[in-house]
Amino acid sequence: MKFGISTFITDQGIRPVPLGKALEARAFDSLFIAEHSHIPVDRESPYPGGGELPEIYYRTLDPFVALSAIGVVTERLLLATGIALIPERDPLMTAKEVATLDLLSGGRAILGVGIGWNREEMRNHGTDPSTRGRLTDERLGAITQLWTTEKAEFHGDFVDFDPVYSWPKPVQRPHPPIYVGGGEGAFARVVRYGDAWLANGVPPEQLGPQIERLRSLAGRDVPVTVYGVPGDQGQVEGYLALGVERVLFSLPTVPEGETLEELDRLAEVAARYR
């Protein structure tokens, strides 16, 4: 099983460059970082975690700028969004950003995607929350066309463009892997567009039946990465027993010194299973 880190990079915690160096030095294989373009002042959408929305949601750095900085100072670390909010992203620009990151990093980009929960945030991007799932599917279809076709075009209900040139093309073939986040409602999206399922903090006892349902629907062995896992040895062993491909330990957003101490602890947990 592989071990990576999931976190929010903000202007108040460790900077991207020392974080990337620290992760690679401790043999973590990947970094998945969260995205929010903004948080509306007047918000009615409840925070899925319950209670007040944590401050880290208000202060996230742009994921592709942060990952590009990390890519320059690392050689092996996989650079991933966890997750990019596709209902809030123009597919033409997103395709170019991911392909550029993949090119500059030598083929280390992963596009982790989801449909989001903050309805006020997505409305500010011109997105109707009630159709964000269909919009996401079309944008993913368009992005893969832009990555893999010299003269790409797409014609749907939400995304529509005649043949275009879009470079650079990604280094990875056929394209950077797409990790689809969400619960069982996202399984059809995983099957159609995903190279893996990005399960958000689902405990092992619940995850096993969900993996079985996903693989039955897909008719194939879908890789699973679990996001937001506490550094708990018992949970790691549960995921190991399920054949999970990767565990992403949840890293709090704190200053550099505290971050490095926590990474040392998490690296010790991971080392028991390598």
Image: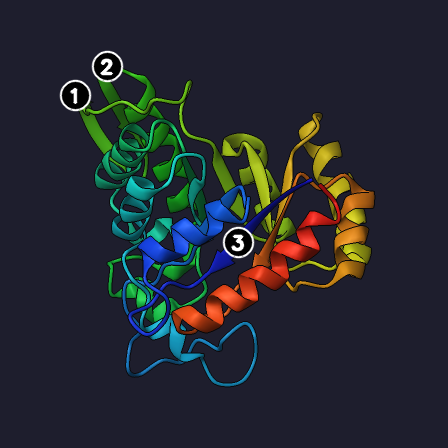
The vertical placement of 22 against 221, above or below, is: below
Q: Amino acid at mark 2?
A: Glu
Q: Quadrant of residue 148?
A: top left
Q: Which residue is mark 3?
A: 5
Residue at the (54%, 49%) spot, across then down: 26
Badge nearest the viewer, 3 or 1: 3
Number of labels in the image equals 3
Q: Which residue is mark 1?
A: 165
Mark 3 and mark 1: Cα distance apart in space? 35 Å
Q: Secondary structure at mark 1?
A: loop
Mark 3 and mark 2: Cα distance apart in space? 35 Å
Mark 2 and mark 1: Cα distance apart in space? 6 Å
Q: Which residue is mark 2?
A: 150
The vertical placement of 64 against 223, above or below, is: below
Q: Earlier in the sequence, mark 3 or mark 1?
A: 3
Badge nearest the viewer, 3 or 2: 3
Residue at the (32%, 62%) spot, across then down: 15
Viewport quadrant of the C terminus:
top right
Residue at the (69%, 48%) spot, across then down: 271
Q: Secondary structure at mark 3?
A: strand
Evaluate if marks 2 and 1 touch, with contact meaning CB atoms under 8 Å apart.
Answer: yes
Observer-nearest residue: 49 or 219?
49
Q: Secondary structure at mark 2?
A: loop
Q: Amino acid at mark 1?
A: Tyr
Q: Is residue 86 left or right of residue 1?
A: left
